[in-house]
Every structure is written in structure tokens, then in C-alpha cells.
Amino acid sequence: MASPRTTRQLAPYGFLSPAIVLFGLFFALPIGYAIHLSLHTVRVKGLGLGTKAREEVWAGLSNYSSALTDPELLAGAGRVLRYGALLVPLMLGLALLFALLLDTARIRFRAASRLAIFLPYAVPGVIGSLLWGFLYLPSISPGYFLLRAVGLSGPDLLSGGGLYLALANIAVWGGTGFNMVVLYTSLRAVPAELYEAARLDGCSEIQIALRIKVPMVLPALVLTFFFSTIATLQVFAEPMTLSPLTNSLSSTWSPLMKVYRDAFVQGGLHSAAATAVVIAVTTLVLSFGFLKLVNKRTSEPTS
């Protein structure tokens, strides 16, 4: 029988064991299996007939070399970067604006407004993409019907440069509310005495927002930028859902769409696993590099 001291020492591990088991089964094990697949390939013997004609063999880093030099992957990464350059500033700008407006003393229907802005975030991305996709189709969209009724022709949002705007609009509609709640919660934590002192000094509401609220909410803004950037690099639902509605969205429009095509359409699980690992490592490097840069600047003493 274990002594009471041993029991006390083992108790924390007992409480942590469910989380450790779940972490290993649903996070560490899939990552390890993806790395295993990325380092192997399938060799076909003879005519490729029979259960023993296909054999998994060691491939080393050849799958990674093919992924890093794949022009489709590089083109998809470029499209995602252009998409993120449009999406992230617009979404965070609107989230900050809404948070500042909701934090003003004269705002009415604050709770209802906050709920209305946040509500699109509760809609799944696929459902939101379908809703907006039907609104983008000129043949069935009520917006295009009203434009035709007054003798105007609306822009084609499913091709050319309008495609980036259409995709970014879906993400802005769904993600602004969440970021607004994060920024608004940070604003509510600012002591009210700072605002009162600023008003006594003659500051207007705009000056208070620009000189007090925005600097105080900057850490939360950096956090939302960090998570929004990660979500942008992993964009999949919006272009994948809209792809049947337009010929401008290829099956490799984004890197994750290419992984999906290679793995489940063309059956190239090993090359898709290598591409997925490359995307994951790139995301981690960019994320930690950004956080390190931000922490370095915030820790520097101000002169």
C-alpha cells in the first residue's frame, strides 16, 4: 500500500491523466502519424494488381522537396497572402470600431447591438459561405435583381479581383463579432477613473478613444491579430464551399485545398501529409516569430 506522501505526489498526475490521454490520442498521435506518412511513399510492383502489389517504402525527404518546389502550393500561398492582406486589417478595424462605439457612455441598446454583431460568429463557416454564395449569384441574388430593376448591372463578385472581396466579406461577416467581444472585454477592464480624469482635462470622446482606449487595448488587438492571421493561413471552408459556384476557384486555390485534393481526390496521402507538415511548420514559425517580435518591442524601455 502506498504511503500518504507517495499518494500526495501522484495525485496531480492522476488528475492530469485524462487530459494527457486525450492530448496523446487526438493531438500528438495524429501529428506523429502525419509525419510518418510524409516520410514514406507507395511503390507499385508489376501491374499494380492485387493486395501485395502496393508497398509502403521509405522516401526520406523527397516528399518535402516536392512540396516546397510545387508551383501550385506556392501560387496558393500567394493567393492566401493577398486574401489575408485584405481580410485582417478590415476585420480588426471594424472590430475595434464596434468595440469603441459600444464602450461609449451614450450608446443605447448596448446588449442588443453586441449580440447582433456577435451573432454571425455562431453560424458555421460552411453555412455562412452558402448564404453569401447565393447572394453573389446574379441569377438568384435579390441584390442583382434590384440593380437590374433600375437599369444597372452589378459587379461579378465570383471572378477576377472581386473574388478576393467576396471571400473576405464572408470572413469579415463571421469573424468581426468574436474579435469585437475580445476587444470590448479588454476595454471594460480599463479603470473608469482614467476616462473621468481625461474629461476633466477637456478631452473629447474621440481623443479619449485614440489616446487612452486604443493604447490600453493594444495587447488584446495584438492577440486578435495573431489568431486572425493563423485562421487566414488555414482558410478552407469559404473557397471550398464557393468553388462549385464559379470556375475562378480551382481545387488548389488555397494550400489546405491542395492538401485535400491530393489526399482524398488523387489518393496521394503521403505527399499530402508532407504538404500539411510544411504548412503547419510555416504557420508555427510565423506565429512564434511574430510573438517574439511583439514581446521584444513591448519589453524595450521607453525613452
Image (cartoon, rainbow, N blue to C red):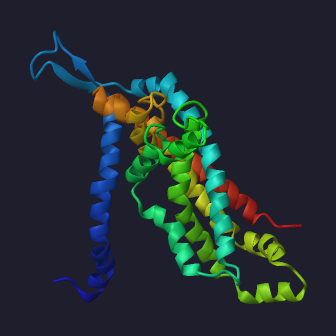
Query: In this image, 255 relative to 300: left or right?
Result: left
Residue at the far top in the pictured view: 46
Height in image: 37 above or below 219?
above
Query: In this image, 226 relative to 269: left or right?
Result: right
Point out residue 260 in the picture as x, y percentages from the top left corner: 36, 35
Q: Quadrant of the N terminus?
A: bottom left
Q: Quadrant of the C terminus?
A: bottom right
**Quarter occupied by residue 265:** top left
Q: Residue at x 56, y 34 (%)?
A: 156
Height in image: 292 above or below 77?
below
Point out residue 120 in the picture as x, y percentages from the top left corner: 47, 62
**Quarter occupied by residue 123:** bottom left
Residue at the far left in the pictured view: 50
Q: Residue at x 69, y 72 (%)?
A: 100
Q: Residue at x 16, y 15 (%)?
A: 48
Query: In this image, 5 relative to 186: left or right?
Result: left
